[in-house]
Each structure stands twice: as C-alpha cells, then as structure tokens.
C-alpha cells in the first residue's frame, strides 16, 4: 500500500476516528523501514503517479504481534482500573 493509501485505510477502518497527518506518517514509515519492519519499492499509483509502496516484512509481522500483545495488556489493565473505580465510587 502506498503512503496515502495507508492514511485512508486507517481513517476508514477506524470509522474516521483516527487520522494520521503526512508530517507524522512519512517519518514513521521511514523509521519502520530503517528498523527492517517494512520494505518499500517504487510503483505507479491508481492515478498513474509514482508512489512508494510499503509492505510488512517478517520482522515487521513479529513486531506487530509484540505491539498487539503489549496493547492488549495495557487496555486490559486500564479496563480493570476503570471497572474497579466505577464499582467503588
């Protein structure tokens, strides 16, 4: 997926709640490429413009799994705190 496509995808799957600005997206993509989590190559977009396309690498899939696990632990902990707070208010 190219950078603009990543932005649109995030907006669509989050029901327009999450928006990623270009000034944040491209530096993040560059850092992920430097870390070996994504690979990039040049191609032509749907409207015949040159675009850089990104895909997850094997290392990126492992990192994604680790981030998902960490996020799940964090959100479960926050839920426990909020549930405790509302039960003891």
Image (tube, helix red, strand yellow):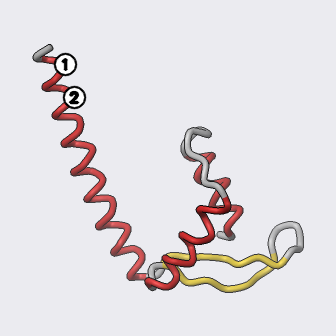
User: Do callouts 1 and 2 mark residues in contact (Cβ within 8 Å)?
Assistant: yes
Furthest residue toward front: 23
Q: In this rendering, would 5 be left or right of 37?
A: right
Classed neighbour count for the residue bearing mark 2: other residues with Cα under 10 Å, few (<14), some (14–19), many (≥20) = few
Q: Which residue is mark 1?
A: 86
Q: Nearer the viewer, residue 23 or 17?
A: 23
Q: In this rendering, would 65 be left or right of 84?
A: right
Q: CA distance from mark 1 to mark 2?
A: 6 Å
Location of residue 81 in the rendering, given as x and y in whole percent from the top left corner: 17, 33
Q: Which residue is mark 2?
A: 82
Location of residue 63 in the rendering, given as x and y in whole percent from the top left corner: 35, 73
Q: Residue at x 19, y 42 (%)?
A: 77
Q: Residue at x 22, y 42 (%)?
A: 76
| Vertical arrangement, residue 54 with respect to residue 68, above or below | below
| Vertical arrangement, residue 40 with respect to residue 81, above or below | below
Element marked by disc 1: helix
């Amino acid at each position: 997926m190219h950078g603009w496509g990543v932005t649109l995808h995030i907006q669509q799957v989050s029901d327009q709640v999450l928006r990623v600005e270009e000034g944040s997206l491209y530096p993040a993509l560059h850092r992920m490429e430097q870390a070996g989590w994504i690979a990039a190559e040049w191609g032509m977009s749907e409207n015949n413009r040159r675009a850089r396309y990104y895909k997850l690498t094997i290392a990126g899939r492992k990192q994604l799994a680790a981030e998902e696990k960490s996020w799940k632990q964090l959100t479960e902990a926050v839920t426990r705190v909020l549930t405790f707070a509302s039960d003891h208010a």
